Amino acid sequence: MALELYFYNECGFSRSVLNCMTNLHCEDKIVKKNIRENPEYETELIALTGAKTVPVLVIEGKALKGSEEINKYLVVEFM
C-alpha cells in the first residue's frame, strides 16, 4: 500500500502525526514529504487538495486530512 504524508516540522498537527508514526513504528512504511524543505511537494499537495494545509496522508491516491483522522487511521492500520 502506498502511503505519503505531507507535513512540515513546525506544524503542531504534523508533529502529532509524526509522533504517532514513531510510537507505532511505521515510519519506514510511509513516504514523508516535507513541504517546507521541498517546494515540489507543496505543489503536489495543492494539486491534490487545492490547499497547502498539512498534515495530509495520501492512501492509494486518496487524501486523508487532519491529524486526528490520520492518527486514527494509523492506529487501526499499524497497531
Image (spheres, rainbow, N blue to C red):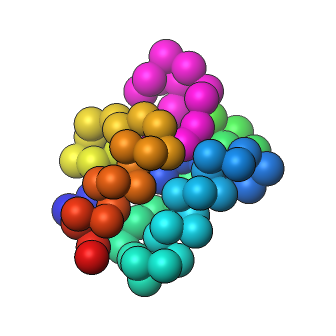
> In the rendered image of this protein, does residue 52 appear above or below residue 73?
above
- The residue shown at (53%, 57%) is 17
Residue at the far bottom in the pictured view: 25
41 or 51: nearer the viewer: 51
Quarter occupied by the C terminus = bottom left
Q: Give the percent coordinates (x, y) of residue 21.
A: 47, 70
- The residue shown at (44%, 45%) is 68
- The residue shown at (49%, 79%) is 23
Residue at the far top in the pictured view: 50
Q: Within the image, what quadrant is residue 24 found in? A: bottom left
Q: Within the image, what quadrant is residue 76 found in? A: bottom left
> In the rendered image of this protein, does residue 8 appear above or below residue 29?
above
Q: Give the percent coordinates (x, y) of residue 33.
A: 57, 53
Instruction: Please report the bounds of the magenta region as a residue range.
Output: 45-57
Look at the image and say whether residue 39 sits in the magenta stretch.
no
Q: Give the percent coordinates (x, y) of residue 74.
A: 33, 62
Q: Give the percent coordinates (x, y) of residue 8.
A: 69, 49
Viewer can see residue 67:
yes
> In the rendered image of this protein, does residue 28 appear above or below residue 76?
below
- The residue shown at (41%, 66%) is 30
> In the rendered image of this protein, does residue 65 appear above or below residue 35?
above
Viewer can see residue 43:
no
Look at the image and say whether residue 47 sits in the magenta stretch.
yes
